[in-house]
């Protein structure tokens, strides 16, 4: 089996509540608890193939939600912008230009409020 695609953990954070509870639980165990398909099958009392099918359906559903809504992508872009704004703020403070530093701090605050 290939490496787990950890973007599904992020998508689960955004859209997990939209999945049926059984699917949400299995994909959570697979990605967030790092259990194998066999371990999940044993825990929930179904076949390994049943778990794999459920995880695959959940992945498809999460990708569909992200394609339509784009919340995880927007969150990642905001987080990257906040990181860059933080670095810019530090550079502005070091430059000694109070106006520029104040503007950078304002931008950083705005981006950080959007992350929450």
Image (cartoon, rainbow, N blue to C red):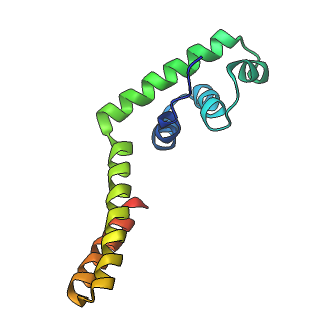
Q: Nearer the viewer, residue 19 or 32?
A: 32
As drawn, which residue projects farthest toward the front?
95
Percent of width and height locating residue 94: 33, 84
Seen at 60% across and 33% down, the residue is 31
Q: Nearer the viewer, residue 80 or 110?
A: 80
In the rendered image, the vertical position of residue 112 relative to residue 35, given as above or below: below
Q: Nearer the viewer, residue 2 or 36?
A: 2
In the rendered image, the vertical position of residue 34 relative to residue 60, given as above or below: below
Percent of width and height locating residue 21: 60, 30
Q: Nearer the viewer, residue 76 or 12?
A: 76
In the rendered image, the vertical position of residue 84 relative to residue 33, given as above or below: below
Seen at 53% across and 38% down, the residue is 9
Seen at 37% across and 51% down, the residue is 75
- Left or right: where 15 falls relative to 114: right
* Residue 91: quarter of image: bottom left
Seen at 27% across and 89% down, the residue is 96
In the rendered image, the vertical position of residue 57 relative to residue 79, given as above or below: above
Mark count: 0
């Amino acid at each position: 089996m290939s490496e787990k695609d950890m973007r599904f953990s992020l998508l689960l954070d955004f859209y997990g509540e939209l999945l049926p509870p059984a699917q949400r639980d299995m994909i959570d165990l697979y990605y967030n608890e790092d259990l194998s398909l066999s371990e999940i099958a044993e825990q929930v009392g179904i076949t390994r193939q049943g778990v794999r099918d459920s995880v695959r359906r959940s992945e498809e559903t999460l990708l569909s939600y992200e394609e339509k809504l784009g919340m995880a992508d927007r969150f990642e872009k905001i987080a990257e912008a906040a990181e860059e704004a933080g670095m810019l703020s530090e550079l502005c403070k070091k430059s000694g230009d109070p106006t520029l530093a104040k503007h950078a701090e304002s931008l950083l605050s705005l981006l950080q409020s959007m992350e929450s």
